[in-house]
Amino acid sequence: MNQRITGFDLARALAIFGMVIVNFKIAMKAETGNFLLINFAELFEGRASALFVILAGVGITFITNKARISNNRLFILKSRLSVIKRGILLIAIGLVYTPIWEADILHFYGVYFLIAAATLTVNDKTLLFISALIMMLFPVLLLFFNYDQNWSWVTLIYENFWTFDGMVRHIIFNGFHPIFPWAAFLFFGMWLGRQDLSQAFMRKRLLIWSVITLIITECSFYLIRIAVGDGSSVEMTPEEVALVFSTSIIPPLPQYIISAGSSAVITLVTCLYFSEKYSESNIVRWLYQTGKVSLTLYVAHVIIGMGLLESIGMLENQTINFSLLSALIFCIFGVFFSVIWLKFFKTGPLEWIFRKVAS
């Protein structure tokens, strides 16, 4: 069990690092520089955040498992209320944080938690069904609602966010991480947390199926894009072909959810393996500790990391080389901070506040 928990925190650290890389690139508008580095940074777009949400689902399962297994109504009710309080707190933190960082994921997290609170006792198959249903409903919504509404794609600014209609649309359908389809990752994570990942056989099975799924999905849609070409044969524009048949994060179509979910499982299983095989390694221990303060580092990478760069006039219009260097420096300091902090405290500063308020 200890290696299992360590492995999840190790994966959480990698998810944070990936999100720092992506967000620094976005904030700096880093579209120039070394071609290989640009491609490297693009590997994390929509992948690190997907892993982050899946791990949140795993976490919900961990904190509610005893209540679910006990079948005690009062115990289950207490667990539901705990998840609801965590969700409300995440929404509050996220909405305060959003004016600083418009691509915030925390307020979406909070809404996911509120939905998850109602499904704590459903069986494993139902969790997978809910996950698949949420994923498949998104393209249906695309047929009835304008995905581009309120968006300025050049600046990545979402207009009318603070209106009732804008916020509802943003959270449910066309924000950075809307319920449809992003909550699919959370429910899949809840299912994943119920699996006995301490067993090598289960990890191997998940790894093999995830690799197969990832390869099939990516190759299939790559071949479709080649076959369709510029789209004239199917009365589509090249832009429409790129959007409809891509596995990128925007728009988050089912093929993206499947591809990103598969890569997240591959990363997670790999982390579980390394945490078990190299449990005495200092690097694994440092990364595990970094994962324990992921909420603090998520907020800090914008307020402190980007804030410092902005104060010295080096945040916008940078090359990918400088963006990745800045992300690397922040991640190194994040590891250093985590190791030192946890020598004196059991949890990170924001994690401590979170537990106190939501307990």
Image (cartoon, rainbow, N blue to C red):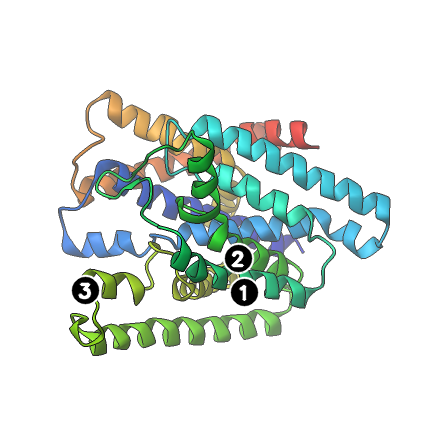
Q: Where's residue 292, x and y in %?
A: 55, 40
Q: Say which residue label 2 marks.
A: 184
Figure quadrant of the C terminus: top right
Q: Nearer the viewer, mark 2 or mark 3?
A: 3
Confirm or deny contact between disc 1 and disc 2 (CB under 8 A): yes
Q: Which of marks 1 and 3 is nearer the N terminus?
A: 1
The tally of labels here is 3
- Residue located at (67% from left, 50% from top): 62
Q: Say which residue label 1 marks.
A: 132
Q: How far apart are marks 2 and 3 (CA)?
A: 30 Å
Q: Where's residue 74, x and y in %?
A: 85, 43
From this view, report whether residue 150 is shown above or below residue 234.
Answer: above
Q: Horizontal placement of 129 versus 300: left or right?
A: right
Q: Say which residue label 3 marks.
A: 237
Q: Which amino acid does label 1 sit on?
A: Ala
Q: Which residue lies furthest to the front in this view?
A: 144
Q: Horizontal placement of 86 versus 40: left or right?
A: right
From this view, report whether residue 321 is shown above or below residue 197.
Answer: above
Q: Which of marks 1 and 3 is in front?
A: 3
Quadrant assignment, res 85: top right
Q: Earlier in the sequence, mark 1 or mark 2?
A: 1
Disc 2 packing (10 Å; few <14; some 14–19; many ≥20): many
Label 1: element kind: helix
Asked if one can make out residue 342 in the rendered structure from this viewpoint, the answer is: no
Q: What residue type is labelled 3?
A: Thr
